[in-house]
Image (tube, rainbow, N blue to C red):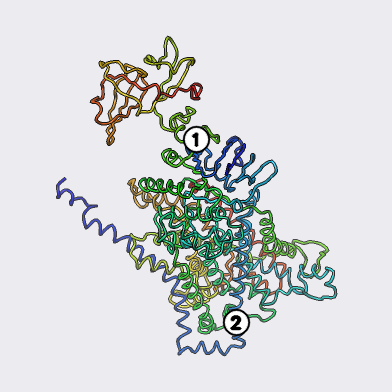
Amino acid sequence: MQELKVEKLVKRYPGSDRVVAVNQVDVEVEAGEMLVLLGPSGCGKTTLLRCVAGLEDAQEGRITLEGKPVFDASIGLNQPTHLRDIGMVFQNYSLWPHMTVQRNVEYPLRARGAASAERTKRAREVLDVVQCGHLTDRLPAMLSGGQQQRIALARALAPRPKIMLLDEPLSNLDALLRVELRAHLRAIHREVGFTGIYVTHDQIEAFNLGTRVAVMNAGRIEQLDSANNVYERPATEYVAKFLGIRNCLALDAQGGWHSGATKLEGDLALLDGLKGPLQMYVRPQSVNLLPTSGPAPDAGQLWLSGARVTDVLYSGGEIDYVVDLGGNTLYVTARASAMRIQAGDAVTLSFSNADALVYAQGRLAGA
Amino acid sequence: MTVASATGRAWWGTGGLVRRKAIPQAGWMVLATVVGFLVLWPILQLQWRAFVDGGSAFARVLALPRIGTTLQTTIVLAILSSVLAVFIGTLLAWCASMLPERVRRIGEVAPLLPLVVPAVAAVTGWIFLLSPKVGYLNMILRKLPGMGGMEEGPFNIYSVTGIIIITGLLLSSFVYVFVFTGLKNMGQELEAAAAACGASPAMRFFTITLPLLRPSIIFATGVVFLLGLGQFTAPLLLGRTAKIDVLTTEMFYLTERYPIDFGLGAALGFPILAIGLLVVLVQKLALGEQRRFVVVSARSRYNVRETRPWAAVVIGIYLLVTTVLPLLALIYVSISPFWSGSLVVPEFTLRHWTSVLKNVGLVDAIWTSVKTSVIGIAILIPLGFLMAFALLQSTRIIRPARMAIDLFATLPIAVPASLMGFGLLFVYSQPPIQIYGTNAVLVVTYVTLMIGHSTRLQFTTLVGTGQEFLEASRASGAGALRSLFYVLLPMCRKGIAATAALTFVLLFHEFSASLMVRSARTQVIGSVMYDVWAGGVYAEVAVLALIMVVVTVIGVLIAGWLGGTDSVQRKD
């Protein structure tokens, strides 16, 4: 059963009729699932979350929580935030500075009319879950950013809400803490099993935490799929670009497939039946550099010859090669020990056809 | 680089450092000394008079008839009017935060409009409305069914209750300014968090909003309590008929007798001064633990407070009661042949207007008001700017100078204008600085009264501007002066203009201190208005009050025009 159902939701900001922050969005979240809304700033992911929370009023559509409508533009239904039984974690933590940690966490229970003893017990419980049981009497100003975010999480979890809404909860923390809290959050989600929507612009966060990931663009959901599928098979060129697949080859069919003046050779089965122009995307990690003098690549490979290495960048255990292919700049990431190739060397680029993502008119071919 | 060449550079060497630091430090000390003299000299000199001769002045105070009642009225008036003002001001701020989009811009400014009407004018307007026998509003109310047979009332403005309500209304705008600013700065994210936790709007207001507004409310309460304690205008104009006196009116009556018993006045003022200092101290202590009020972000993306059309109605009623009705009453009286107590006037006349404008004494007083206010502002703005700047330099200005500047920026706010005026009259009417009887005494009075406000307001602007911009300018190689003129002043332009506008309003409306230090040759509009009022020519009082309103509006508009548009200030 769906915990949350959003149907044909439209949100326009006043004064700008053309900019539609949320455009005809349909999405469902199953019980126990963590749905991640992923996208760059301004794509409408936070607005969608706030519409679910009731902190933003949409103009069209319907939102249903546990089968009960909380928003329905057609009949003018708009349940206020405090009646929706949600838990929300804010980017800026939003802990009330005048209340101790304990009082902050008890607050949603108090709002729901829980008895004092029960409030204390439950607050202790969730504070232990987030490993902050020792901080009960502190004021928020005495806590570190990471601690504040844990308390904010505990506060949202305390009343066992129907749905947890997390609005870029880790983006104000430094890199190391982010990794730590991400793992912790994942563990808590497994342990407690809450249903949640998680907004982020960080794809690693999205793939780590999301049961499913929805990639948003200009108010619409471009792709909604399991984390694995979104990573392996980006449905659109936009998603591929957003995920940082940097190598793009524009292909034309003129006496065989060409990228610019360079001919694409090898196992071309995946292009069968397609008409140009096409865009082919390959991750830097999937590309191999071969010396031009070397043997021909294996079966099931695609290759382009006549490329030249323009720069070699060492970054820890890996090397990034910047390669020029007839004016098109491509990137190759390889293990540091793999090859001895220097700037200026002529090379052949090869990759498995399973790693090539082909887009026709912006959509993944064969999908 | 060799050691020799490094130490050889002047800016590096010890000598250079000392020279660079010594001159500005001396400058700040001079600034602290000058302002300290302005503020402390009149207060200390006057209070000294209360304590010489073994405190005989206090014995004379105790011998005054009805002194117990006067003291009691002073304190009751201060407490009740500030309670009323805090209640109304907070309610208005809350309403302003719930205004529907269409009326938001107007609605947020509306509660400030009463400040444009001088207290003297507002009180006069209220007398026209609520004087027990001939007040227009009373006459209309008596015509209602069930009111038959009443000869006067139902309201009597010449009563302690009347004075409390009028004073409370006059002070409520100040509370609104502080509380509304507090609300705006707080943003709505913390309320949104409470809503997401399931808190109803009422629960949010009482558990989140109100506690977080505590600093603003405490500060506002302190300010209006001090103003209520030194309240002079309403008790003077409303209390005479029913023989209601407060300490400040007693002091004023002393100045009308010759020779003036300064010792007695000082002793009368002593309780006000003592309570005033106590209030400032309590305020500082109460606001001590600031970290409970550190609020995350001012720029909130959240909008959780529901808009309520009735919020606009509340603000509308407030505006009607405090501003529109008194102004209408003033206009009506100013064009009636005389204030007769009749609702229907046979014919309107402009003769009061022509009579005022032909009266050389009155026109001179208006000009004196404008001139001294403008000169006062010309001194106050740079002086306050420097003091505010000094308060911000926590590392670069020596601590004693900063603490002194802080004290001198606080004291004038703690000392009521009427008491300060009495002290100024005392010190400047005798050697070594005998300027009583010249316009200079008015300018000095205005600067002394307002230096605290000028500093505080510009301090807020400077804090909002942020130190980094100035540091970026210095790091780009600009000197102190270039940074000041090219970076700091342009960025603070709007805030400075707002300070100038508010200072102009406060100075042009200044009544209490002006009435103390005026002389036969140096009159301002407030003081001549009192004379005309005491002479019973109410229609001309109305004309003068309206002129005050018009000039105020013009002054505010000019300041707004000098301040330019919002564009420079928009930081997000």
- Within 10 Å of the Cα at label 1, are there few (<14), some (14-19), or many (20+) other Cα atoms? many
| Horizontal side of residue B27 vs B367, given as left or right | left
Name the residue carrying label 2: B72
Position in image of residue A178 (x %, y %): 39, 46
Residue B145: percent from left, percent from top: 85, 69
Q: Amino acid at mark 1?
A: Val
A248 lies above or below B31:
above
Secondary structure at numbered mark 1: strand
Amino acid on which the number 2 mark rests in the picture? Gln
Residue A215 disc label:
1
Between the residue at mark 1 and the residue at mark 2, the CA separation in whole angstroms equals 71 Å
Residue at (43, 69) in percent of width and height: B408
Judge by depth and name the residue closer to the eye, B167 or A350.
Answer: A350
Find residue A125 and report its horizontal and vertical position in percent. 46, 58
Q: Quadrant of residue A112?
A: bottom right
> Which of B364 and A42 lies nearest the eye of the viewer?
A42
* Left or right: A334 in relation to A75: left
Q: Are marks 1 and 2 on the same chain?
A: no
Rendered location of residue A135, percent (x, y): 41, 61
Q: Which quarter of the rendered picture does the N terminus of chain B lie within?
A: top left
B250 lies left or right of B451: right
Looking at the picture, tell me which residue is in the foreground, A79 or B156: A79
Please report, as a chain letter, where disc 1 is located.
A
Tally the marks. Answer: 2
- Chain of the residue that carries numbered disc 2 in the rendered image: B
Front residue of A254 and A353 = A353
Q: Quadrant of residue B534?
A: bottom right
Asked if one can make out residue A316 in the rendered structure from this viewpoint, the answer is yes
Disc 2 secondary structure class? helix
Crowdedness near tag 2: few (<14), some (14–19) or many (≥20) residues, C-alpha within 10 Å = some
Residue at 50%, 35% (x, y): give it. A215
- Residue B378 at least partly seen: no
